[in-house]
Amino acid sequence: MLMSHYSTRRMPDHADAKGQEDLLTDKLSAGPKPVDVHVGGRIRLRRTLLGMSQERLGEALGLTFQQVQKYERGTNRVSASRLYELSDVLDVPVSFFFDGLEHGRRPVGRGSAEALGFAQAQEAFGGSSDGPVASASEMALLSRRETIELVRTYYRIEDAATRRRVLDLIRMMIPPE
């Protein structure tokens, strides 16, 4: 009798157990999620703009440089508390890490081309925005090593008038549209 009790109970097979594990761990697909990759890219961008190594950032956060690498690749998710620490160490608001993030899964309102970001929502209610929100292609351009090096070098020019002349020179080199 005891044996019949056990035989009627269906044991989950490997596929069922894996499906339950995926639901519990939120791993419906392999690889990092786009938002984690974006946040990691923003961490890398700010770190490199500051001229900070992964080792130095890791030390400031009490992490190894390998953990910083995983955050930057989006392999490991950044917790809310760690994001707050990063914003302090990198001297940016927490929202910086989400700037330029496309809102692909967010519902779009009727008649609007895209969902409003926080800055646009502030403007709609009479608030002000700190400036335009960069597109994904602009964010990719700003993340390039060459761009970062150019910006760093530009701001090493101490005299503001000289910096302005360099900017004017670069603009003169661009073919007319």
Image (cartoon, rainbow, N blue to C red):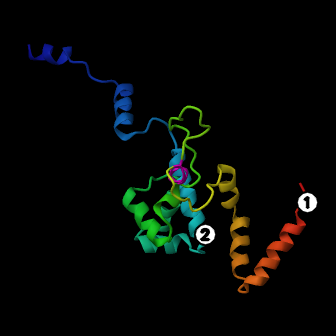
Left-right relation of 110 to 152: left
Residue displayed at 19% across by 15% down? 7
* Quarter location, residue 115: top right
* Lower position in the chain sequence, tag 2 or tag 1: 2
Residue displayed at 69% across by 55% down? 138
Residue wearing tag 1: 175
Please name the predominant secondary structure of the magenta segment in the image. Answer: helix
Kindly check if marks 2 and 1 are in contact, taking CB atoms under 8 A apart as contact.
no
Compared with residue 19, is residue 43 higher up or lower down, i.e. above or below?
Answer: below
Compared with residue 140, is residue 26 higher up or lower down, i.e. above or below?
Answer: above
Compared with residue 57, is residue 39 higher up or lower down, i.e. above or below?
Answer: above
Disc 2 vs disc 1: which is toward the camera?
1
| Three-letter code for the amino acid on which mark 2 is drawn | Thr
Compared with residue 1, is residue 119 higher up or lower down, i.e. above or below?
Answer: below
Circle 2 residues within 10 Å: few <14, some 14–19, many ≥20: some
Q: Quadrant of the N terminus?
A: top left
Left-right relation of 60 to 51: left
* Quarter location, residue 151: bottom right
Q: Position of residue 41 (x, y in %)?
A: 58, 57
Q: Which of 84 and 33 is in front in this view?
A: 84
Q: What element carries label 2?
A: helix
Q: Is mark 1 on a helix, strand or loop?
A: loop
Q: Nearer the viewer, residue 15 or 106?
A: 106
The magenta span reads: 117-124
Q: Which mark is residue 80?
A: none
Q: Position of residue 34 (x, y in %)?
A: 54, 45
| Three-letter code for the amino acid on which mark 1 is drawn | Pro
Q: Which of 63 and 1 is in front in this view?
A: 63
* Quarter location, residue 159: bottom right
Circle 1 residues within 10 Å: few <14, some 14–19, many ≥20: few
Residue wearing tag 2: 48
